[in-house]
Image (spheres, rainbow, N blue to C red):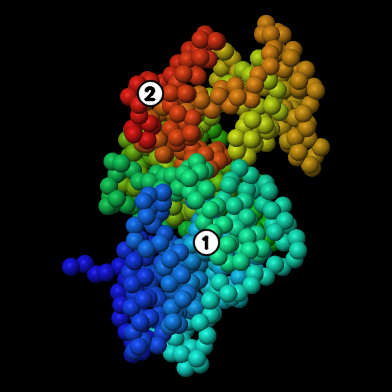
Amino acid sequence: MSEPAVIRSTQGEIGVLTVNNPPVNALSAAVRTGLDEGVKAFGADPAIKAIVLIGGGRTFIAGADIREFGKPRAGTDLNEVIRIMETSPKIIVAALHGTPLGGGLETALGAHYRISAPTTRLGLPEVHLGLLPGAGGTQRLPRLTGAAYALEAMVSGRHIPAKEAASKGIVDRIAEGDLLQSAVAYARELVAQKAPLKRVRDQQVKLESPTAIADFERSIARKARGFKAPWHIVKTVQAAVELPFDQGLARERELFQELLTSSESAAQRFYFFAEREAAKVKDVPSDTPQREIKTAGIIGAGTMGGGIAMNFANAGIPVTVLEVKQDALDRGLKTIRTNYENTAKRGGMKAEDVEKRMALIKPTMDYNDLKDADVIIEAVFETMEVKEGVFKKLDEVAKPGAILATNTSGLDVNQIASYTKRPGDVIGMHFFSPANVMKLLENVRGKATSKDVIASVMTLSKRIGKIPTLVGVCEGFVGNRMLRQRGVQSAYMLEEGALPQQIDKVIFDFGFPMGPFQMSDLAGNDVGWRIRQGKKEKEQRNVRYTGYVADAICELGRFGQKTGSGYYKYNLPDRTPIPDPEVEKIIEENSKRLGITRRAISDQEILERTLYPMVNEGAKILEEGMAQRALDIDVIWVNGYGWPVYRGGPMWWADNVVGLKTIHDALLKYKEMSGDPFWEPAPLLKRLVAEGKKFSDV
């Protein structure tokens, strides 16, 4: 017979309720019912003077069971459990350790007193699921901490260290030694003192200033753009300030339900699980033996190489950085140090941490210094000729079993692997710039890449703070391959009647950080210009050339923000893009030269022509097996390309917001209008529409 979800025991006159729902004691129906029954039973027992609530295993209650959201309710409602705790005739002490988050912290706030292990980190992170705390957290936390602090804590969703929580009154005491014994002793002390049944709900909310809430709204205006949950959290705290507790609680429940049924929260809940699933490789079992990685080597000390090196140093892994010229090496190390020092100035690390991390980075110009590295990543110039030289040299010096990785953003990993006698050791590790900031790591398996290398690199990715995905070898891999489709249509629409600022605004309003032309100006228009020249794109591609306007802009030296002009003007150092009549003239002249009569293009057409082709390309990628699942594509786009998480990712958005038939029919409409085979729906998309299925069914 299995143990109950909440175990009752006693230590003398103290009743102990131990939550027993491993691994993280999630608030399942069985746990909620167990708490309800346990509190009532001890409350009615004359031999029990106080109750301690504690979590078994590695944590106190770590939160709600997310999989229950939106489903018919079973067991006692959490709000009812907390009401029963608050109204218990016996003092209840919540003993916190691990990560009491969300509903876990809300449960603890229903206790009369809280004691915490010194290593505890607690919080109300529901905002990351597109929700707000729905069991009184928005009403109780401000009563302990004040409105402004509670707003910041809930809208950021951050984990609060125990010491900070104690300073803000969230916990009453930090335990010394064994948590259970400390909690029992604290409960006995409270009984002996005849301490009151201190209910958080009975306290008043402290409003730090008359404008505290309005000031907070202004502070999050840009960061919270497009999200619903942060603004609903503000409304609930406003209710805590203005309304009696029970009315505030009703307002919280109303707004929680509104969020729970929103597409934004559905998208964010989907993404929560997708990110974890993307780290799993279908044909690589979780028990696959992995290669030990204690040291790393990076070839190239430029922006990318330096950023990659920082990831290893941040994880405490010694890394050797190789450059062919001393001045390039010195410049790279100086940039790394400057980045660390700037982080320290902002309070992101201590000054001594800068030196610790720099000490882990060894500069060299000698390939032999890489001979003992367990993993070596090249971050050199993006041409096959340069990569060939690097990998032939690595084949000579790297030790047997070393993982050899290329940071290429689109070159053929199989061809790169062929330059070695050990293609099974070669894998792509496509970092995104700046590599020390961007979370996505698009790992690329070649046809010969061994499974232990894949398993090792997926684990290493998480170890160095990245969100890993695994993709196959194709031009542009997954992210850049789909991005190209958006770029093609953006360029065509410039020629047909749109302007950069209109296209950028549509993409920005959809939720991206910026549109394609602002992004190009930021990255440098000369990058794409040189690639187009190298590929001789006009002759090689059986599609309408997309670079006429871009080439004309670059020929004027308008390379973007760094030159003060690109698709926009910039009054440097101010980087605000300003629409430029000179660019409009270039665009109009190009349309005339191509014989295109310009027309008004609606925002809806821009949205469809930029995003629907991306979804169609995603369908091709899935069918070719270049991505394992639709969710992998979504994780790549959210973390690498700024797709708004509250829209779930392009494939989830297509499945659940737009509908595959709508996209399929729009593609055919544009094909008929243009005669361009670009718009032909992918075979997988056609099949799914015919069968009434979704990408998530593949």
Amino acid type indicated by mark 1 = Leu
Considering the image in quadrants, where does the C terminus appear?
top left
Q: Which corner quadrant holds the N terminus? A: bottom left
Element assignment for label 1: loop
Q: Nearer the viewer, residue 553 or 610?
A: 610
Q: CA distance from mark 2 to mark 1?
A: 40 Å
- Which label sits on residue 371? none
Q: Badges 2 and 1: C-beta atoms under 8 Å apart? A: no
| Residue 74 is at least partly visible in this image | yes
Q: Which residue is mark 2?
A: 689
Q: Residue at x 62, y 51 (%)?
A: 231
Q: Is residue 349 visible?
A: no
Which residue is depicted at the point 27% across and 52% down? Answer: 287
- Within 10 Å of disc 1 (Cα), the crowding (few <14, some 14-19, many 20+) is many
Q: Is residue 203 left or right of residue 121?
A: right
Q: Which residue corresponds to mark 1?
A: 124
Q: Compared with residue 94, is residue 155 higher up or lower down, i.e. above or below? A: above
- Percent across and percent down for residue 64 are 42, 59
Name the residue type under label 2: Val
Q: Residue at x 59, y 15 (%)?
A: 545
Q: Quadrant of residue 157?
A: bottom right
Which residue is outermost to the left? 1
Residue located at (79% from left, 42% from top):
573
Residue 600: percent from left, percent from top? 69, 16
Front residue of 184 and 360: 184
Q: Could you say which is closer to the camera, residue 365 or residue 418? A: 418
Residue 140: give x, y in percent of width and height: 56, 68
Instruction: Kindly indicate the quadrant of the structure image that contains residue 236.
Output: bottom right
- Circle 2: element type: helix
Q: Earlier in the sequence, mark 2 or mark 1?
A: 1
